[in-house]
Amino acid sequence: MNITVWNEFRHERNKQAVKEIYPEGIHQVIADFLKEEGRTVQTATLDEAEHGLTEDVLNQTDVLLWWGHVAHEEVSDEVVKKVQQRVLDGMGLIVLHSGHFSKIFKALMGTSCDLKWREAGEKERLWVVDPAHPIAEGIGEYFELEHEEMYGEHFDIPAPDELIFMSWFEGGEVFRSGVTYKRGNGKIFYFRPGHETHPTYFNENVQRVIQNAVKWAAPVKRERPVYGNAQPIEELRGE
């Protein structure tokens, strides 16, 4: 399986607190724990040519992970269209944390993808509400993150195909933190945790969920359906 981990890579260079946690970038931490499964993993960042997502890179990617926050509008519409087409053709997409507001996620959802938020470093408890789902494999009834950014309902997304994780926050809010969708031949998983000022991506449960999600989102080996005017399969009988 070929995986590409995409990240803006801005906070890690511009904020000392983030650089101390992720000196080589959030993308590199994610890439490192995904490599432990023996996969082929590469990274791409916003300031590379074509944001690191050239046609060759996308065509060779089975699953793309996306982390963005402060520079959503800097992602070119042309690249977004290419990524969207690859998802429709079967590439898996895993959108992380503030990637909910990325151009690609909003394009695939067709809604604002807006929500409530608060940066207070509060406890988050993620409940598994679909224990039979493969993305929840190896996770108990719930797990906790001692310090995270709060995201709260209402989360303006279409009704998910599947709801896997539901979060509760110390301040009282709840949030649909793990949801799946199918678009065309592709599978999409949105996973909420991952604020840049907390070491969330070093958490074993978070890593396990992302590893499971990559397996789940891998493309099914089949051609995309043919659309448009079609010749009859059977011989047509005249009137």
Image (tube, helix red, strand yellow):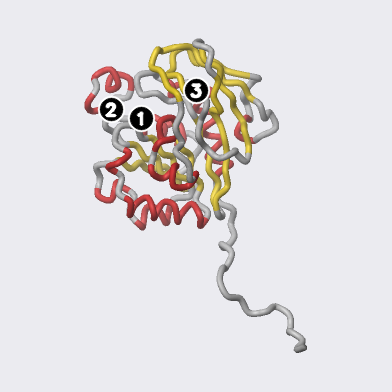
Residue drawn at the location 45% of the way across and 56% of the way down: 85
Are dots 2 and 1 in contact, CB under 8 Å? yes
Give the structural element (helix, strand or loop) at label 1.
Answer: helix
Q: For the residue marked with disc 1, what is the amino acid?
A: Ile
Is residue 168 found left or right of 133 in the rendered image? Answer: left
Name the quadrant containing residue 176. Answer: top right
Image height of 197 relative to 239, above or below: above
Q: Distance between the residues labelled 3 and 2?
A: 23 Å
How far is mark 2 from mark 1, CA to CA? 9 Å
Q: For mark 1, what is the residue?
A: 26
Q: Quadrant of the C terminus?
A: bottom right
Q: Is mark 2 on a helix, strand or loop?
A: helix
- Amino acid type at mark 3: Gly
Residue 68: horizontal and vertical position, in percent? 36, 35
Residue hosting label 2: 11
Say if 209 sits above or below 3 in the image: above
Identify the element where label 3 is drawn: strand
Residue at image point 48% right, 52% down: 87
Q: Which residue is drawn at 44% across and 17% down?
A: 148
Q: Is residue 57 left or right of residue 228?
A: left
Q: Residue 51, how many percent across, how many down? A: 29, 46
Q: Residue 21 is drawn in which quadrant?
A: top left
Q: Distance between the residues labelled 3 and 1?
A: 23 Å
Name the N-terminal-most of marks 2 and 1. 2
* Residue 152, numbered circle: 3
